[in-house]
Every structure is written in C-alpha cells, then in structure tokens.
Image (tube, rainbow, N blue to C red):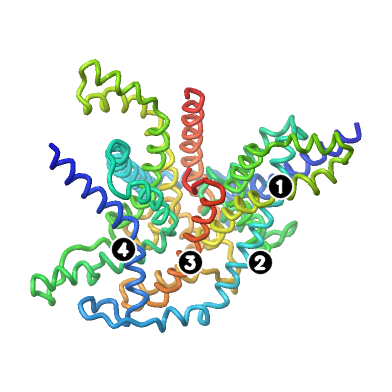
Amino acid sequence: MKNKNIFSLWSFLIISLFTILIVYPLFMLGREAFTESGTTSFTLDNLKRLFHPRYLKIIWNTFYISFYTTLLSIGIGIPMSLFIWKQNFWGKDELVSLLIIPFMVPSYILVMFIMVLFSRNGIINVVIGRFLNNTEYILPINLLFDLKGILAIFLVHNLVLVIYMMLSFLSSINPSYEEAAISLGATPFTAIRKVILPIMNPVILGSGMLIIARAMSSYAVIFLIGGKRYKTLSVEVVSQAFGYLDINFSSALAIAVSVMTTITMYSYINVSRKRKAMQ
Amino acid sequence: MKILTIILKVLVFVCLASFIFLPILVLGFLGFTQDWTQIFNPSFTVEWFLSVPQIFSKAILYSLILAFITMCLTLVVSSLVAYLILREKITRFSGVIDVLIMLPLTIPQIVLGLAFMITFNQPPLRLYGTFGILILGHFVVTMPYAFRNIRSTMENFDFSILEAAICLGASEPIALRRVILPAIAPSLLASSLFSFVFSLANFPMTYIIAPAGIRTIPLVLFGYIESEIGGANYRLAGCLSLYLIGLVILLSMVVRKLTGRNFVE
C-alpha cells in the first residue's frame, strides 16, 4: 500500500512538471490572444483581425509554401527512392547513410550556402560570367529574396526525410507481391505503378503531413530569404511581438499557426499508427 | 535500355554525392579563402578558421554548457519516466504523460518560445532574462526526442536481471543501482547525445527567449547572416558554421554507431 502511494506521487510530480512547463504557458498564450492590448478586458478583436486581407494573404502564403515544398519533395523523393531501392550501384549504401549529413546541417547555415553559391554575385554567376567572357554583366541566377531559395532549402531537408521514410518502408515490403505481378505478365514498370505505389500510399500521405507541419512552423529560412515579400504566419508572429510590440495579436497569430500544425501532426501520427497496425 | 539505366545510375550517384557534400565544400571554400569571390585564383588561409575559438569563445562556451545541462536534465527525467511507465509503476496516467511530453513536437517552436516569454515574465515564475529560462526551454523542446529514444532503449533492455537480483535478496533501489545502472548506462548516454545535438543546433526557441547578454552559436550565426546579407564578408561566420556542423555531424555519427538509430524519423 505504501509503495503504491509513493508512485502515484511520482505520476503527480511528473504531470505537474509538464503542466507547468507546457500546458500553463500555452494557456497563458491563449489568454493573451483574448485580451485587449494594454488592458485586461476580454475581446475577440485579435481573432477578427486575422481575417483582414493583409493577414489572409499571410495565411495563404503559409499554405502555399508548405504545399509546394511537399509537392516538390514527394515528387522528387518517390522516384529517387524507388530507383535507389531497385538498382544497385557503386557506393549506394554509403551514400544513403551519408544522407544524414545535409539533414543535420541547420537550415540557417544552408541560407549562407545559398548566398555564396546562388546569389547575384555568387559563385555560379561568376563562373558562368567567366565562361561567357562577360564579367560586367550580372547573370540572372538569383535565389536570394525569392520563393525559389526558400523551396531549395526546404527541399534539402525534406528530400532526405522522404528518402529515408520511403526506403525504410520499401525494405519491409514483401518482394513476392512484385514477383507475382511480374510472373503474371506485368512489366516491371507496371508492377511498381499498380502494386507497389498503392501499398506506399500511407507512407506518402504520412511524410506529406510531416513536411507540411515542418514547413509551416519554419521561421529562420523564410525570414532570411523571403525578406519582406514572403511572410508566413511564423514570421509574422515574431514581427508582431518584437517589431510592433503587440503581444496580444501575436498570440492570436501563434494560436492560428499552432492549430494548423497540430491538426497536420495529429493526422500524421494517426496515419503512421494505422500503418503500423496494418503491418 | 541498358545504356539508359547506366546513365541514370551515374546521374543519381552524382546528384546524391553533390547533395551530400556540396554545402560543406562551399562553406569550407568560404571559410578557408581570403576572398571567396575570387574563384579562379583563390588564396587559401587558415587564419580565420584558427581565430574562431578565440573570437567566439563566449558563444561556444554558452552553447556547450547549455547543451550539456539540457542533456543531463533530459537524461534524468526521461529515464525516470520511461522506467516508471515500463515497470508499470504509473499505469493510470501513462497516456496523459505521453501526450504531454510529445506536445512540443506538434507546436512550432516560435509559438512555444512566445508562450514561455509571456508566462515567465510574470510574478509567480519570473525567469525571463535569466539563463534558467533557456535551460527550461531547451529541456521542453528536446524532451520528445530524448524520451522516445530512451524509452525504446529501455524497451529493448531485458529487465529480468532486475527480478533475478530482487529474488536473490537485493532491495529494488540497490538492484537498480548495482545491477541495472551499470548495464544500461552506456546506451542511455548514447541516446541522450540526441538532446545534446538538438540543443546545440536549436535556433527558434533560443532566438525568442535568450536573455540579452547570452548569445549561443546559432544566434551569433543568425546575426551574421542577417546583417551581412548581400555583403561579402561571411568568412568568420563560415568558419564558425564549419565548427558547428562538424560537431553536430560527428556526434550524430557517434550516436548512430552506438544505438543504430537515425535522427530522421
């Protein structure tokens, strides 16, 4: 009996630790969102302000960037991982295990890489200029301050994510499915399209959800490369809080973005749980 | 058809290889040359690279201390929670605890940082502007990863030796300390290196809650990139980022060697 008491004390301690550190701050954030700035009175104005065209544009940008990132990473990642899975080439295993390197390079450092390589007076433009014997003319390759640069950096991280997720799933597929399809007269290409791809659907959906959530919550890359043109919700949260010092409205924006990421992350968790149950 | 496959293989190989090594090569070129815009006749130097520890000594020190404290905290708390859950000391609330610990994964770190800033700037817990809030913030954002890894390390551990020790007359605390701890400590330490790496490279949370005087390596780098945008002198930042990347990649390779797990999930 004594033993039991001690351990329910443990669960009380652990739950209260994480309530103070996670739930309570989020509750305070929510309270700020419903408070008029400068006073303590209740208001819905901050939430109404979210539907102002200026902020609708920002919400749209958030969706736009995460949608394109997902589309690109999955569109490139699936054929690539299928190719890596089917074909054997020199140094394949080493390369796949070294893919962790670009994934572990923090994204703000990749911004510096983009600047050095792809900005207006970056290495690529200088090299092209030298080959065209035309050093005065600045060539048009420029990923800085542009949506392309943001997508390029997101692509680096998320492509690794997609390839790892796909490969770990593909290695668990029973090879007899494909062999059966081929022995029944399907070409290898048809076998992949009609047999393997449908089995992969849950993984594709899951990785898509994960990428959407990651892109929505990203801050540093969009702030550094997007400049003023491409603001997303995460960037606007910071600029409202530290630029305009409007904590209340910034909290409302923060709640909007967390609702979006929480929904996608929970559907990701559900999808992967279902997949594990199926296997 | 055969030629096409070979061409494709070469193409994929080149793509993957450049994908992996290009960022580091470019940053290395940036850090080790006098002027990176002179690509065709570069003059190499190690002057910048060697001066980094001196110039950024404070930032490096802060980052390492913070990462070390975060690692110790997450190691202790997550092994305690994982042990209590796995040995069914906590049965009724284990689901609640799991959701609570995993919650920071679903919320952007920027938002969590803002919530921390609002909450710990008020009387009951006035921590804003101290090193303490940084530790708490890093603890919260690295906890999901640390907990998941330490829990799966413990799930793979055979606890029947604990029962054997208890059968032989040891009390549970003594059995834990003398039998389980020596056996499980190396793999627990390896899993907790995850939190060290995450804390070391963490930017968004640190950016919001860091006190004015305390600037970790990611904050210093961000400041460089932000202020020098369009300029030409990122040599120091390039060298500093090489240090950070080197440490992060080295540690992640060590973790993978020791635990067989990736950072990618």
Mark 1 vs mark 3: tell me if same chain. Answer: yes
Q: Secondary structure at mark 1?
A: helix
Reading the image, the residue beneath label 2 is: B131
Q: Secondary structure at mark 2?
A: helix
Reading the image, the residue beneath label 3 is: B244
Q: Secondary structure at mark 4?
A: helix
Quadrant for the N terminus of chain B in the image: top left
Amino acid type indicated by mark 4: Ile
Residue A36 screen position, x and y as percent:
57, 51
Reading the image, the residue beneath label 4 is: A114
The span from disc 3 to disc 4 (Cα, nearest Å) is: 18 Å
Amino acid type indicated by mark 1: Ala
Q: Return the disc, 1 or 3, that comes first in the chain's sequence.
A: 1
Q: Nearer the viewer, mark 1 or mark 3?
A: 1
The span from disc 1 to disc 4 (Cα, nearest Å) is: 46 Å
The span from disc 1 to disc 2 (Cα, nearest Å) is: 34 Å
The span from disc 3 to disc 2 (Cα, nearest Å) is: 21 Å
Q: Nearer the viewer, mark 3 or mark 2?
A: 3
Q: Return the disc, 3 or 2, that comes first in the chain's sequence.
A: 2
Mark 3 vs mark 2: tell me if same chain. Answer: yes
Judge the density around disc 3: few (<14), some (14-19), many (≥20) Cα neighbours within 10 Å: many
Reading the image, the residue beneath label 1 is: B183
Q: Chain of mark 1?
A: B
Amino acid type indicated by mark 3: Leu
Q: Tell me whether circle 4 and circle 2 mark residues in contact (CB < 8 Å).
A: no
Seen from the viewer's position, the closer of residues B252 and A267 is B252
Residue B72 screen position, x and y as percent:
68, 57
